[in-house]
């Protein structure tokens, strides 16, 4: 890489001298250009925020703060409230975290601390691949495979044994909150795993050694020292994961049940904010109040994104402080966080246990009342005694000579659990992949790639309209998004200073975190309505808005990896800064940036929700800029929600094509950059 | 040297890619130059339209891009002017008509029946239901399939002790509009608690997108029941049964029974094309029937597209009926076809 | 550096050579027999046999990379943590082979504690740092923990400085205080042997002095093995010194003798600063 750059250097040397006079002007122009493009992310954030704010004014004026506390969603009576959807979003996201956090951290521990390299590397990659699976494929798999399974044997078992707890009360429905939580959990899992693994790896070795030196077992070391050291980083990762879960749209809309009643049972259908938007935004144009209410919900999502990002950045920033000033003189941030977290610890210890105990007693009482549990054979009665017994058992052993042996057993057990959790995550990926391959293989017929959609009973139909659509949308998004993203990234890495830079970067991160469905509503308002048409162009713009922040941040990260000596070399020869950036720095980081771009493109190619309101879909294989257009993802959504076997098979087939594409890109990226950038 | 070459390749590659992209995007045609009409809305009419479009393309070379996004969205997008025609089984109310950007014409394109399909392992077709029972199922008052009221109606069926999974629409829908109007007509409790409309506040159930979504939900959920257009039940071999009509007879949605019901509404439709015909009188009338309408502007902005749209609809209400009948849609009465053609002639293109 | 060493060593009268400790008379606390350690294929320690007596400070010196840390880490099996490390030969603690199959390595490390080059307190309060070891080894009793913490901190000469701020983060302490905290943390589990790998290399002279003083006190109770690059320090604190070179133990004996009249030419070259 450096030799390459040097050659570039000698080539530009003379030219640089020749154009010295113009160089300064060019420099200024280039700098302003990067700044302007970087500013676009800030502009977009402000614009989206204002747009949501204005559009929701009607609903705000009508319902006020009551909107947040009302469970009504009644179109005939023009009465709208957000509580049902806020509740659904909270419950499904909480479930997602409940699943993703233990598995993710367990897997991260295994990958970072236990597994030898030859296991750790491929497994990490597989788990990261899980992050690259498009949301709509999770939805497809969730609806076709997970829902019947959860609704069948799983629900039967749980309801039979735990049915007297309100959240597990029967009857079970096909699509329900639990399914949404599980699907979301699987989607957040790779993210939590990857970030936690990095945080654990960044914990200084000396910390572990200190614990081992005192005779701690591996598990004790990991649990009470390594995790503790990396705690704020992991919490940051979890919060970012939460942000993703909150904004996830299609997969949830396909499995959550879409019912506007709040139910305490996880086996009952529910609704989330993004899935409501996906379902109703297109039909609300002629009902101003409903539209305004929907956009108020979009605004809530937007605000949640902001808050989540601020929190997570704050925590991750503390970690980086923490890690930079290792050990000896770590600053006061740590101690301040320590104090807060130890306070939280105390709270948990002092409040949770009594609360749990009360809940248990209360529930037993309820259970006996309802005669839900009338026999001691019900396993649930034994939960609390077993936990108490466990604690007692530990205390008993503690004072005996068996304690050491017990610690070793516990060590092996917990490490085995971590390994098991890793295998679970990988198995989930393999199961999804297996389903898509097996089911999708049937769809690959000669006409699959050459024909557009046909009527549902015609087996000679294909998905050409979807494939062409995805290609066209990606091209439009790239043409618009890449220059902005790359130049914005150059600004962040090369020109940005101080507060403004931090602000721009923050804006990019927020933009990255805005749920895609919200971006869809935004583009509908600024493009589809004024143009009076759905079009490939507006779909492309929506995707471009999602592409910009990812490309910006990747470019920045990769440019920062280019050693300063290269820049100094070029500047020292009299080249202007813009020339240095274009001719030396960018080429040096080229491979990485291209892969980063490929990954970002793979991600937007898997988007569905914003396209529903912008590209709209087209049965005909169209490539026209100003006409509605289809995409693989929209086809998968429509086909998998249809009852026609031919279409469902084609949905699996499209999923296979999409997955293969995304996986190949990820694999290529991994091979080219060797871990320089993370896919998650 | 090598870098130079690589760079040149890069540049030529990029130029190729961009130019081909431009050619594609400006519609330089990978496919034929055919005109495309965009329609959206009703999923009630979707099987018929899906049947029509390839035939019409074959006959007249016009592409019809029809997106079955639900009647509510069809109306919405028609109003927003983003589609050439909207399709809805819920005719516009007077106030909705007023809010439209210009005078809007209703063109009935198909007539059909809605059935209550179910998924009951071990139970075949023919489950008898009455209006009040359907209403109570959808109100969540009847929770299990072996509820005495259902058993009493179906003494010879082995109804399992399975909880009922009610399926409804997650989108604003004309199918829902017709169904809830029916329920309001037969059940005061329903009329009071829920009412009728394109999207209502469902007391129980799971929502699926469009008729296809509801059908799919029923297919996958043991114990499921939902209201869908007849074609969906037939295409997917889902069972349904006779429903008690206004005269107290249990009737199946046969073409004759549906026609009997629809014929009672023709006179009213001649006064106002938007009239509903649910719970129609008559010994043989099937109680849940309705029309799907195309919505078009009387004074269209894009004349060329409007002409093509009118041509297509003209074809649909006449020759198209024959193809729709293959899917067990009800051929529209000559008087209704006449009304449709009359309305089409009003378009100033 | 060179000059300093001479000034330390030269004042010692030739005749004052103390004879090496009589091995037969004193039972060794730690004994190694033909100890070899490999990292992958590289041999880092070659055939080390040494007797380390109890209640003394033993200093290990030698040029960088000669295997001092490796040796130290093989005495409490910290090398187990390195995947590529392999050990042959025997290490006896009180006559028991610590590499024998049934030995509990966690128990071993409790008996043979370790203090590292850079202070590495845990991200917890001072109290929790010291109480960490006792806790994992099964002590939960609050009063007893407080007792242990106070005793250990007192032994590590830190009690007076921190007794009012036990709840504060350990990161708020100065470098020297942190190192003494690490020593206290080590003492809290009640070890028999203390291994110290360059414990003062990151400290200023004052803090170094405090720690050396501490070692002097601790040797009344513990066997202390310390690795140091500071020969002055070795001379000041230790009674026995071992010189390592390229993985071999070249010379081991009484500190003052080793520094004044080394028996091996390489030792002499090293302490005279001719290489390394
Ligand atoms: N984890 C390891 N893997 C492979 N080789 C290692 C490892 N640790 C140490 N070595 C090698 O073993 C040899 C001895 O290393 P050791 O750390 O014991 O030296 P040292 O005497 O402590 O040096 P210093 O005075 O610099 O601390 C060195 O050649 C080193 O490269
Ligand atoms: Mg060392």
Image: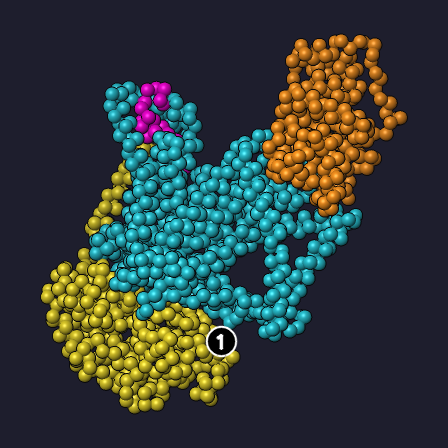
Chain colours: A cyan, B yellow, C orange
* A97 or A678, nearer to the observer: A97
For disc 1, the neighbor class at 10 Å (few under 14, some 14 to 19, many from 20) is some
Q: Residue at 44% across / 70% down in the picture?
A: B220
Find the magenta span and give its range. Answer: A570-593
Magenta span has A588?
yes
Magenta span has B39?
no
Rendered image quadrant of residue C222: top right
Query: Residue B247: where, in percent of width, then height?
Result: 32, 90
Look at the image and tell me whether residue B116 can be seen.
yes
Look at the image and tell me whether residue B51 can be seen.
no
* A662 or A245, nearer to the observer: A245
Q: Residue at 31% across / 34% down in the picture?
A: A34
Q: Residue at 86% across / 29% down in the picture?
A: C27
* A227 or A413, nearer to the observer: A227
Query: Residue A338: where, in percent of width, then height?
Result: 57, 40
Query: Residue A353: where, in percent of width, then height?
Result: 62, 56
Q: Is A656 placed above or below B122 here?
A: above
Numbered-mark total: 1
Q: Chain of mark 1?
A: B
> The N terminus of chain A appears in which quarter of the rendering?
top left
Label the magenta part by its dominant secondary structure: helix
Horizontal relation, residue C106 to residue B137: left or right: right
Horizontal relation, residue A307 to residue B318: left or right: right
Q: Is A183 placed above or below A111 here?
A: below
Dot 1: element: loop
The residue identified by callout 1 is: B163
Q: Residue at 53% across / 65% down in the picture?
A: A167
Query: Residue A239: where, in percent of width, then height?
Result: 48, 48
Horizontal relation, residue B206 to residue A290: left or right: right
């Amino acid at each position: 890489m450096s030799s390459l750059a040097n050659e570039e250097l000698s080539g530009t040397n003379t030219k640089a001298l020749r154009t010295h006079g113009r160089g300064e002007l060019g420099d200024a122009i280039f700098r302003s250009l990067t700044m302007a493009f970087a500013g676009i992310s800030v502009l977009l954030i402000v614009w989206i925020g204002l747009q949501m704010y204005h559009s929701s004014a009607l609903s705000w004026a009508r319902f006020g703060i009551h909107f947040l506390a009302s469970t009504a969603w009644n179109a005939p009576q023009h009465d709208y409230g957000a509580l049902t959807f806020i509740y659904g979003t909270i419950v499904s996201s909480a479930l997602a975290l409940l699943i993703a956090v233990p598995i993710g951290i367990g897997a991260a521990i295994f990958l970072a601390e236990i597994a030898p390299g030859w296991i750790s590397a491929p497994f990490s990659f597989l788990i990261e691949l899980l992050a690259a699976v498009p949301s709509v494929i999770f939805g497809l798999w969730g609806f076709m495979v997970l829902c019947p399974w959860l609704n069948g044997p799983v629900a039967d078992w749980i309801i039979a044994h735990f049915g007297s707890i309100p959240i597990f009360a029967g009857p079970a429905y096909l699509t329900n909150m639990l399914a949404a939580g599980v699907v979301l959990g699987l989607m957040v899992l790779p993210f939590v795993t990857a970030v936690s693994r990095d945080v654990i790896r960044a914990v200084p070795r000396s910390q572990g050694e200190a614990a081992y030196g005192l005779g701690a077992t591996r598990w004790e070391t990991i649990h009470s020292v390594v995790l503790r050291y990396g705690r704020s980083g992991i919490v940051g990762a979890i919060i970012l994961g939460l942000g993703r879960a909150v904004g996830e749209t299609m997969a949830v809309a396909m499995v959550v049940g879409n019912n506007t009643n709040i139910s305490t049972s996880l086996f009952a259908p529910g609704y989330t904010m993004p899935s409501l938007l996906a379902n109703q935004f297109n039909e609300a144009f002629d009902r101003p109040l409903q539209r305004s209410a929907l956009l108020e919900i979009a605004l809530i999502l937007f605000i949640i994104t902001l808050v989540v990002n601020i929190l997570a950045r704050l925590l991750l920033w503390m970690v980086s402080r923490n890690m930079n000033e290792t050990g000896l003189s770590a600053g006061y941030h740590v101690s301040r966080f320590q104090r807060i977290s130890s306070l939280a610890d105390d709270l948990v210890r002092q409040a949770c246990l009594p609360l749990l105990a009360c809940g248990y007693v209360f529930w037993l009482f309820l259970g006996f009342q309802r005669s839900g549990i009338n026999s001691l054979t019900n396993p649930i009665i034994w939960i609390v005694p077993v936990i108490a017994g466990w604690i007692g058992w530990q205390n008993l052993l503690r004072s005996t000579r068996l304690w050491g042996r017990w610690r070793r057993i516990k060590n092996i057990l917990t490490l085995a659990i971590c390994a098991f959790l890793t295998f679970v995550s990988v198995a989930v990926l393999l199961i999804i992949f297996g389903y898509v391959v097996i089911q999708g293989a049937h769809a690959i017929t000669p006409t699959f790639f050459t024909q557009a959609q046909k009527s549902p009973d015609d087996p000679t139909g294909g998905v050409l309209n979807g494939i062409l659509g995805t290609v066209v949308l990606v091209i439009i998004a790239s043409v618009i998004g890449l220059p902005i993203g790359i130049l914005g990234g150059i600004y962040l890495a090369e020109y940005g200073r101080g507060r403004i830079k931090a602000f721009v970067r923050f804006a990019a991160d927020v933009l990255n975190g805005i749920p895609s469905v919200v971006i869809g509503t935004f583009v509908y308002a600024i493009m589809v309505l004024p143009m009076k048409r759905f079009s490939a162009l507006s779909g492309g713009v929506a995707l471009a808005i999602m592409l910009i922040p990812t490309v910006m941040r990747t470019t920045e990260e990769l440019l920062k990896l280019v050693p300063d000596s290269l820049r100094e070399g070029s500047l020292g020869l009299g080249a202007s800064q813009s020339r240095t950036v274009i001719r030396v720095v960018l080429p040096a980081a080229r491979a990485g940036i291209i892969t980063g771009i490929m990954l970002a493109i793979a991600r937007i190619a898997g988007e569905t929700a914003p396209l529903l309101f912008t590209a709209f879909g087209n049965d005909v294989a169209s490539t026209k800029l100003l006409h509605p257009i289809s995409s693989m993802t929209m086809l998968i959504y429509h086909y998998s929600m249809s009852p026609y076997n031919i279409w469902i098979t084609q949905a699996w087939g499209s999923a296979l094509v999409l997955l293969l594409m995304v996986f190949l890109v990820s694999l290529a990226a991994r091979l080219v950059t060797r871990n320089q950038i993370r896919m998650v | 040297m090598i870098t130079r070459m690589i760079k040149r390749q890069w540049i030529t590659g990029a130029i190729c890619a961009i130019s081909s992209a431009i050619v594609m995007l400006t519609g330089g045609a990978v496919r034929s130059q055919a005109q495309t009409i965009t329609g959206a809305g009703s999923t009630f009419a979707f099987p018929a339209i899906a049947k029509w479009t390839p035939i019409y393309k074959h006959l007249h070379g016009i592409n019809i891009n029809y997106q079955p996004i639900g009647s509510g969205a069809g109306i919405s997008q028609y109003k927003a002017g983003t589609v050439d025609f909207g399709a809805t089984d819920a005719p516009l109310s007077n106030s909705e008509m007023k809010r439209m950007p210009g005078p809007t014409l209703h063109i009935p394109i198909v007539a059909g029946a809605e059935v209550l399909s179910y998924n009951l392992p071990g139970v075949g077709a023919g489950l008898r239901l009455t209006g009040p029972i359907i209403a109570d199922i959808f109100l969540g008052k009847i929770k299990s399939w072996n509820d005495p009221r259902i058993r009493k109606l179906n003494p010879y069926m082995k109804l399992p002790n399975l909880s009922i999974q009610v399926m409804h629409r997650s989108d604003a829908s004309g199918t829902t509009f017709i169904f809830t109007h029916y329920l309001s007509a037969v059940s005061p409790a329903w009329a009071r608690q829920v009412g009728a409309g394109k999207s209502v506040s469902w007391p129980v159930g799971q929502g699926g997108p469009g008729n296809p979504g509801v059908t799919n939900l029923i297919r996958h959920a043991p114990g499921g029941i939902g209201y869908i257009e007849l074609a969906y039940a037939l295409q997917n071999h889902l069972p349904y049964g006779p429903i008690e009509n206004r005269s107290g007879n249990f009737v199946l949605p046969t073409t004759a029974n549906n026609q009997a019901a629809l014929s009672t509404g023709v006179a009213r439709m001649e006064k106002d094309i938007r009239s509903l015909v649910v719970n129609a009188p008559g010994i043989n009338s099937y109680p849940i029937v309705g029309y799907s309408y195309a919505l078009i502007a009387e004074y269209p902005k894009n004349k060329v597209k409007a002409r093509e749209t009118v041509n297509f609809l003209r074809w649909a209400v006449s020759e198209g009926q024959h193809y729709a009948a293959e899917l067990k849609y009800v051929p529209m009465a000559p008087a209704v076809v006449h009304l449709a053609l009359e309305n089409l002639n009003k378009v100033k293109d | 550096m060179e000059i300093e060493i001479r000034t330390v060593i030269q004042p010692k009268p030739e005749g004052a050579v103390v004879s090496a400790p009589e091995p037969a008379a004193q039972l060794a606390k730690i004994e190694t027999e033909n100890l070899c350690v490999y990292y992958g294929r590289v041999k880092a320690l070659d055939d080390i046999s040494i007797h380390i007596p109890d209640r003394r400070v033993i200093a290990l010196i030698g040029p960088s990379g000669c295997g001092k840390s490796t040796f130290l880490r093989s005495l409490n099996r910290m090398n187990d943590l390195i995947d590529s490390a392999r050990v042959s030969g025997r290490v006896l603690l009180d006559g028991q082979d610590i590499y024998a199959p049934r030995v509990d390595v966690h128990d071993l490390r409790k008996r043979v504690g370790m203090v590292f080059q850079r202070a590495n307190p845990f991200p917890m309060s001072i109290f929790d740092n010291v109480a960490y070891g006792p806790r994992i080894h099964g002590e939960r009793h609050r009063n007893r923990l407080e007792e242990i913490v106070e005793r250990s901190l007192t032994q590590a000469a830190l009690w007076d400085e921190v007794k009012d701020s036990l709840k504060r983060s350990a990161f708020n302490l100065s470098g020297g205080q942190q190192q003494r905290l690490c020593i206290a943390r080590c003492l809290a589990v009640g070890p028999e042997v203390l291994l110290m790998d360059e414990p003062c290399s990151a400290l200023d002279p004052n803090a170094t002095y405090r720690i050396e003083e501490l070692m002097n006190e601790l040797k009344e109770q513990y066997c202390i093995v310390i690795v140091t690059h500071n020969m002055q320090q070795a001379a000041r604190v230790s009674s026995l010194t071992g010189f390592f070179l390229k993985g071999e133990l070249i010379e081991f004996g009484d500190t003052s003798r080793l520094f004044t009249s080394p028996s091996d030419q390489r030792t002499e070259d090293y302490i005279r600063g001719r290489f390394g």
